[in-house]
Image (spheres, rainbow, N blue to C red):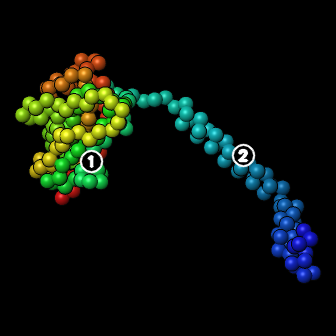
């Protein structure tokens, strides 16, 4: 306080002036206004507490999934897709879509297809298993993240727009016709990833 007085050179310094003003305003505030201010703070705190409680205790709603495909498990975050050297989820026709898998988290036979979000009437675009019947790529359990040697060339079947890519790992190769009705335990993990195909 002495420093403020010295700097103020005999006048009322700014910090002291502000402190006096706060005291005067607090004392002259009408009682009703004081209760309103306290009430608003209490209501705000109560509302925040109720919001946190609702988020933590709300019931988990079921989601629809294709029959035979398990809920996303450890594979969530262990599988990524991308095009080009940056590996972003934006592809152009002619580029190659690559699959990256953390083999320390998930292993098995990789299967994948894409469904158009822009035009849901379009049929699935199958990646693995391929139309030629080539086996699905196998990811052996390991201790690192790998990029699969097999990629998917983005061709004219990928009209520009947004796609949802479903990727799963199974204990053995699965035919296209069998995936929707796969027996329990065959599909270990499943994840869905968004992809955008640019014109």
Residue 165 image point, x, y percent: 25, 40
Query: How would you rate the neighbour count of disc 1 (Cα within 10 Å): few for under 14, some for 14-19, many for 20 or more?
Result: many
Up/down of 28 relative to 114, above or below: below
Residue at position x 25%, y 22% from top?
171
Residue 157 image point, x, y percent: 12, 47
* Residue 171 appears in the rendering: yes
Residue picked out by circle 1: 82
| Direction left: furthest residue | 132
Residue at position x 42%, y 30% from top?
61
Looking at the image, is mark 2 or mark 1 earlier in the sequence?
Answer: 2
97 or 185, which is in the foreground?
A: 97
Q: Report the side of 108 relative to 13 (left or right).
A: left
Residue at position x 26%, y 41% from top?
147
Residue at position x 8%, y 35% from top?
131
Residue picked out by circle 2: 42
* Residue 193 appears in the rendering: no
Residue 124 image point, x, y percent: 16, 38
């Amino acid at each position: 306080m002495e420093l403020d007085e010295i700097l103020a050179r005999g006048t009322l310094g700014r910090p002291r002036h502000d402190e006096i003003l706060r005291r005067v305003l607090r004392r002259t505030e009408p009682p009703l206004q004081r209760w309103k201010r306290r009430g608003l703070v209490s209501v705000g705190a109560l509302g925040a507490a109720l919001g946190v409680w609702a988020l933590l205790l709300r019931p988990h709603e079921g989601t629809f999934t294709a029959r035979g495909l398990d809920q996303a498990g450890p594979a969530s975050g262990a599988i990524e897709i991308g095009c080009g050297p940056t590996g972003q989820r934006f592809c152009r026709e002619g580029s190659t879509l690559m699959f990256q898998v953390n083999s320390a988290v998930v292993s098995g036979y990789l299967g994948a297809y894409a469904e158009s979000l822009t035009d849901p009437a379009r049929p699935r675009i199958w990646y693995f298993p391929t139309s030629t019947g080539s086996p699905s790529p196998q990811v052996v359990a390991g201790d690192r993240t790998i990029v699969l040697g097999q990629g998917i060339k983005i061709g004219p079947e990928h009209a520009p727009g947004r796609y949802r890519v479903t990727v799963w790992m199974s204990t053995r190769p699965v035919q296209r016709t069998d995936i929707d009705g796969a027996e329990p335990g065959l599909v270990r993990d499943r994840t869905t990833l968004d992809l955008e195909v640019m014109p």
